[in-house]
């Protein structure tokens, strides 16, 4: 199982959670970490390169901080420009992603309790990630249960160390 982790964090050097996750994943066999903001500081994507990367992997992981109930803008741009009609969907030949796995792997600033109908955000993570589910359905990917590391603003170093291993294990699991 070759896994492509598409890291989309505009301020990665300041990220405690995402940087710890990436550190845990680095050097793992069959895992490619692709930092979009590092690869494209001008935010001009090489679509052919991105499509080739995706085609060479079995599982695609979107790893990002959950900003304003969505992804950072470069990941949204990546989705808009890379997952296109005629390549990923729209015709019998457009099957580049069909059968591949998609894992949405996010970090939040807020605690888990805030992501309930009674919590501060009024919606669950499942509800807020529905656009990714719809996208995976359209392009024929298998959407894996999402991966969430909550509470960047409050998690202790000890809690982070305890949480990062199962979090990264989910990214690299064989199924």
Image (cartoon, rainbow, N blue to C red):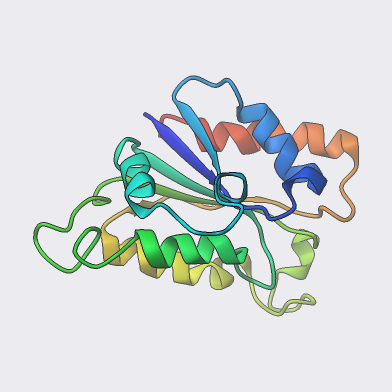
Image: 95 above or below 61: below
Quarter of the image for residue 65 reads: bottom right
Image: 89 above or below 39: below
For the residue pair 66 and 77, the one nearer the viewer reads as 77
Left or right: 11 as drawn, with respect to 139:
right
Q: Position of residue 139 (x, y in %)?
A: 28, 61
Left or right: 118 as drawn, with respect to 141:
right
Quarter of the image where the C terminus is located: top left
Left or right: 88 as drawn, with respect to 123:
left
For the residue pair 154 and 27, the one nearer the viewer reads as 27
Q: Position of residue 17 (x, y in %)?
A: 76, 44
Give the residue at x 46% y 60%: 78
Give the residue at x 23% y 50%: 96
Left or right: 157 as drawn, with respect to 137:
right
Q: Position of residue 69 (x, y in %)?
A: 65, 71
Quarter of the image for residue 120 reads: bottom right
Quarter of the image where the N terminus is located: top left
Q: Position of residue 56 (x, y in %)?
A: 31, 35
For the residue pair 139 and 117, the one nearer the viewer reads as 139
Image: 41 above or below 13: below
Q: How many marks?
A: 0
Give the residue at x 90% y 42%: 156
Give the residue at x 24% y 51%: 98
Residue found at the very far left of the displayed protein? 92
């Amino acid at each position: 199982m070759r896994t492509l982790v598409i890291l989309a964090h505009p301020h990665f050097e300041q990220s405690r959670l995402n940087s710890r996750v990436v550190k845990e994943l680095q050097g793992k066999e069959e895992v490619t970490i692709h930092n979009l903001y590092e690869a494209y500081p001008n935010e001009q994507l090489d679509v052919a390169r991105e499509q080739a990367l995706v085609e060479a992997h079995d599982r695609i992981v979107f790893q990002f901080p959950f900003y304003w109930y969505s992804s950072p803008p470069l990941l949204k741009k990546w989705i808009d420009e890379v997952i296109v009609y005629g390549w990923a969907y729209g015709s019998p030949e457009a099957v580049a992603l069909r059968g591949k796995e998609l894992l949405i792997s996010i970090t939040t600033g807020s605690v888990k309790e805030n992501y309930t109908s009674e919590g501060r955000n009024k919606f669950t993570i499942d509800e807020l990630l529905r656009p990714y589910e719809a996208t995976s359905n359209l392009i024929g990917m298998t959407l894996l249960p999402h991966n969430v590391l909550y509470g960047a603003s409050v998690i202790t170093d000890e809690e982070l160390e305890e949480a990062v291993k199962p979090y990264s294990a989910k990214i690299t699991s064989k199924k």
